[in-house]
Image (cartoon, helix red, strand yellow):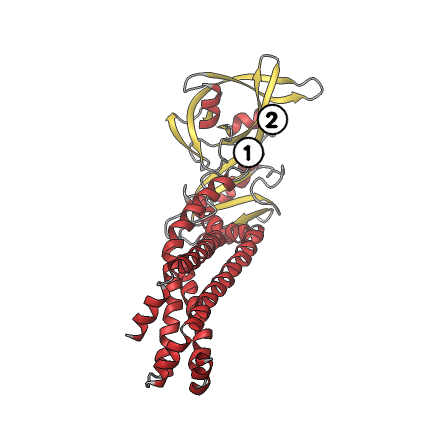
Amino acid sequence: MIVSAFLRSLFRRGGRTALALAGIAVSAALLLDMTMLASGLTGSFGELLGVSGYAIRVTPRGSLPFDSEAGIAGGDEVGRRIAAVPGVRAVAPVLGAQFYLARGASAGEPLFTTGVDPNSQFLYRITSGTPPGPGQVVLSEPLARDEGLSVGDSIRLASDLDISLGRARQTRTWRVSAVADFLYDYAGQRSLAMPIADVQQVTGRTREVSLFGVATDEGVDDGAVARRISAVVPEVSTYSTRELMAEMDRRLLYFQQMATILGSIALAVTALLISTIITIGVRERFGEIATLRAIGVRRRRVLLAIVTEGLVLAGSGCLIGLPLGLWMAGRLDRILLSFPGIPAKMTFFAWDAGRVALAMSIVIAVGAVAGLVPGWNAARTALGRALREEAE
């Protein structure tokens, strides 16, 4: 009964309570977004790595995939040695290069080009057409759309550029065999793929490979297979999904630190808001509280009623802040993913029910603690002093 009376008193002053709820909702939304941001990018990166089944990456010694222009010499031999490792199901070689879209004698912007084995590749999913053969290319959807190209059309590409004149050199015509969704491209990226033998021949990088994607047998631990590959082919670096995610965590430490700082600020603001509102309310009802204690209501019940006010404020703010936070996360995600170099299929803000529940629970717990301070002060004040102060 006392608790319900205190709650009615809390919402009696609707304007003040509404402003407090708005502030708590914004803080809860910020904490929710920072919780999702702290693990979202790494988690979506891990999912993207394993989407095609090629969870292991083998790269030139000391580098990450496409971290530099270094290549693995003798790619055919290295690929055979990797394929012979127990637990390896398939090996997909990749050679990165840069071609130019040729228009007459001039050259357009550079296009990121990958040489792949069409029968074992993990970079794209064909949406129309067939895997490329010799002299054929696969275009990314943005490139096909922007240039008005479709399956069966021809495209002129140059593998070299005369920088002084801005003219294309070594121009060759290729046939479009397919249009595909490139999994690791950023939003709007114009890229293409062709058989790795064609890229090696045109660029003069015979038998060179930029990296290998490795798929393992079902039920086999990726980390164990990665260690076996490192032992068999010590001249390369081998990364399992777990290791790549750990490296991603290291490179994204800035985002995690920012999420921690902003989340802590959100909690501090929530605590201050709830503590201020409840303190004001307690002072306004000081006489009521003193009267209740004078007629025999225990301190513990008074304290419980005031702490419940903090819980209700925090819980109501969380209910409002949850959809607000999801809306903010969607808007921020679109902005951040528009930056070049970030795969469009990744996300900065990943929904994790466990983490979200934990974040909201922390906000509610902070609300309870914030209500505990003014509640304890009101409950422990000597009865005679409380009545005297109220009379004055």
> Image point 37% across, 25% down: which residue?
128
Task: Report the quarter where the N terminus lies.
Answer: bottom left
Count every numbered label the image shows and give the total: 2
Q: Secondary structure at mark 1?
A: strand
242 vs 79: above or below: below
Q: Which of the marked residues, 2 or 1, is nearer the chain's N terminus? A: 1
Quarter of the image holding residue 386? bottom left
Q: Is residue 68 left or right of residue 225?
A: right
The reply to whether the C-beta atoms of the residues labelled 2 and 1 are less than 8 Å apart is yes
Q: CA distance from mark 2 to mark 1?
A: 10 Å
- State the image coordinates of residue 67 (x, y, percent, origin top left): 60, 41
Near mark 2 (Cα within 10 A), the count class, few <14, some 14-19 or many ≥20, is some
Could you tell me if residue 307 is visible in this image?
yes
> Image point 54% across, 38% down: which residue?
339
Q: Amino acid at mark 2?
A: Thr
Near mark 1 (Cα within 10 A), the count class, few <14, some 14-19 or many ≥20, is many
Q: Nearer the viewer, residue 62 or 304?
A: 304
- Kindly identify which residue carries mark 2: 203
Quarter of the image holding residue 16? bottom left
Label of residue 248 in the image: none
Q: Secondary structure at mark 2?
A: helix
- Kindly identify which residue carries mark 1: 95
- State the image coordinates of residue 180 (x, y, percent, origin top left): 42, 29
154 vs 45: above or below: above
Could you tell me if residue 134 is visible in this image?
no
Q: Residue furthest right?
A: 164
Q: Residue furthest front?
A: 392
